[in-house]
Amino acid sequence: MDVRTIDVKTAVTGLVLLTLSLVVYFFIIPSQIEEPPAGPLAMSPSLFCQVSAGLLIFLSLLLTATGVFARKPSATGEQPAASKADEIDHKKVFVTIGATVLYLFMFETVGFFVSTAALMLFLMVYYGNRNWAHVLGIMVVILVFIYLLFVMGLKVVLPEGMLI
Amino acid sequence: MMENLIAAWGIFFQLQNIVAVFFGMALGVLLGAIPGLTATMAIALMIPLTFYMSPVAAIAMLVGAYKGGCYGGSIPAILLNTPGTPAAAATVLDGYPLAKQGKSLKALKMAMYASIIGDGFCDICLILVAPPLAYVALKMGPPETASLILLSLMIITVVAGKSLVRGLLAAALGLLLGTVGMDPMTSTPRLGFGLIELDEGLSLIPMLIGLFAISEVFYYAASKNWGTKGGTLHERSTNPDDNRVTGKEFKGALKIIFTACGIGTFLGAVPGIGPTVAAFASYGQAKKMSKNPEKFGNGAIEGVAAAEAGNNAVAGSNLIPLLTLGIPGDIGAAVLLGAFMMQGLHPGPLLFQENIDLIYAIFMTLILANIAMFFWASIFIRVSNRVTDIPPDLIFPAVLVFCAVGSYAINQNLFDVWAALLFGILGYIMRRTDFPVAPLLIAFVLEPLLERAFRQSILMSGGNLEIFVSSPLSLLFLSLTVISVIMMVRGIMKKKIVIADKDE
């Protein structure tokens, strides 16, 4: 038999989206878009922005309601244990994002090839690969391929920075 | 007519034309397979090479590149959850789950067969029905266009995720992001926050790369299984049937493939719609037609077939408004229009009267392009499938680097790379909170067309919304939109009743 319960994740997601949508509708859109003095509604540059933000507000309310009035089957017997595949390692995600941010700062200051080599080396070793032949081999192959395709073939000027 | 065909054969059957088709196709597939590089880029890069070629060879190479790019996007979509082109985002939905089940070769081969059939079908349509099809497509005014786009958005939202509300939220966010930049009617800056880089709006390629590729890297990073020694990206199945498309699967998918071809051919003939919408619309229809719709999103081979057939059917039908009326169907066709004019050919009704031999010769190169696609696709599949043998801790840093350089290469501006990273973080958060990413991307792509059509309709009617129901075609599209929502809601209610009955 279904039991009425609160799906916290859904309700909180809905509330966060609702808050953001209200900020967009009432603050960001009026401050970022200059309205013409007069004219038909269809010519208003903020019309479609307001329609989109209004839709976000309505749907966020709906999502919050879905979470608050959720119905879940009552628990019968033991719940299955979470498998290893379900576990999330937040630290690895933050480290990956942090490394990428640092890479983008180095992109133009140090140079594309040096910063790219550093990022690839760091991530491959951080994620447990200790086979240096593979690590260095993949790194060299990727950098040479990028040089041949983008620099020589597509004439993309990659930033040089202080080094290369 | 026979004389024209014989003359056309004499023009077409030359070594330089055949080499041009094969070369264009190879480069198109390669560039389409690298996220950040598109079929349009492949054509644009080849145009300087065509200055010294005959008109047929030049067009043959460019069309080969365009078709190759449309197909090439499916390879990383299946292997890495990273669509090489926006249209391949539909192929991801079932292609990547199949790869995770060890059936990457099956998915790649089905994508190849469906692409070739889709391409061949639309080439035949182009040859046989080009003028009347263009006439029908151009009967669509702003209200019909707005209603059709709304229908497309709804279909995509319904099929792309498990939750209708979450899908609609993602689509609404995509519409809002699409409004960033200059207002198309008044040129007023909108939501740019004073940044010059946002004057022309957010760029599609960094969004695509971030939402699909970079978010996948973060998603894999979060998995505690990453870094396991000796692991590969996907365990390949040892069952021989999992590494090929069986006769039964192919026959079962044929009806869906031809339906997708029809959808792709029609939508490709409507200027502005493009292969992305065709791919998702075909996918949605395939799910409705399938005997096992619950498998869609979890590795249904028909899903891959429908998405690729719909996507590639656009490549040829895009040429219908281009050749018959001089109106390009999408950006790729617009670049082709430039190439036609550089060769002294002016697409339009007169082209069929003054250069019929050339036109027939170009049609013959389109047919040859399908053979070239089979040749190159067979090679690329075998080579690219080796990617799955590489451990993820080596692959994903490389993917991250390609994402960065692919985003940078568009405008040679670091802003695009930052945008890709931010969309990567957004995509990761969306996946963790069970929001589908595809509706956001599609809504973003369609927003300019939808907004223009909507506002033009309102202007035409003086603010009266009745204009959307006064046209029979517009009313039909709106009715189908409402029906698709009702059917989705009914499906959800039925599932809940079934689960409740099981508990009792």
Image (cartoon, helix red, strand yellow):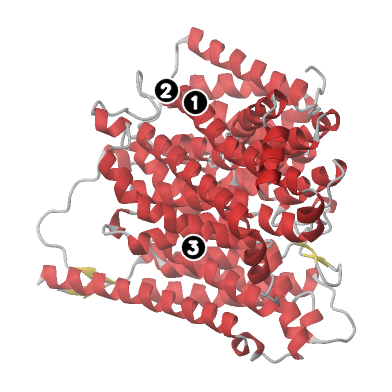
Is the Cβ of the residue at disc 3 closer than 8 Å to that at disc 1? no
Residue B450, position in %: x, y? Answer: 67, 70
Task: Measuring from the top left, give residue B269's x and y in whole percent.
Answer: 63, 60
- In this rendering, the answer to whether A152 lies above or below B167 is above
Residue position for label 1? B395
Mark 3 to mark 1: distance in Å? 30 Å
Q: Amino acid at mark 2?
A: Pro
**Is residue A26 in view?**
no
Q: Residues within 10 Å of mark 1 (few under 14, many from 20)?
A: many
Quadrant assignment for the C terminus of chain B: bottom left
Q: Nearer the viewer, residue A148 or B47?
A: B47
Quarter of image, res B230: top left
Same chain, labels 3 and 1: yes
Mark 1 residue element: helix
Q: Position of residue A97 (x, y in %)?
A: 57, 38
**Along the horizontal axis of the image, is B420 left or right of B245?**
right
The answer to whether residue B121 is left or right of residue B354 is left
- In three-dimensional space, the C-alpha distance between marks 2 and 3, rounded to whole angstroms, equals 33 Å
User: Residue B81, position in %: x, y?
Assistant: 47, 40
Taking A58 as reference, is B461 above or below it?
A: below
Could you tell me if the residues under marks 2 and 1 are in contact, i.e. CB atoms within 8 Å? Answer: yes
Report the residue at 80% width, 32% height from top: B54
Give, as a three-letter code, the residue at label 1.
Ile
* Residue that mark 3 sits on: B156
**Chain under numbered label 1:** B
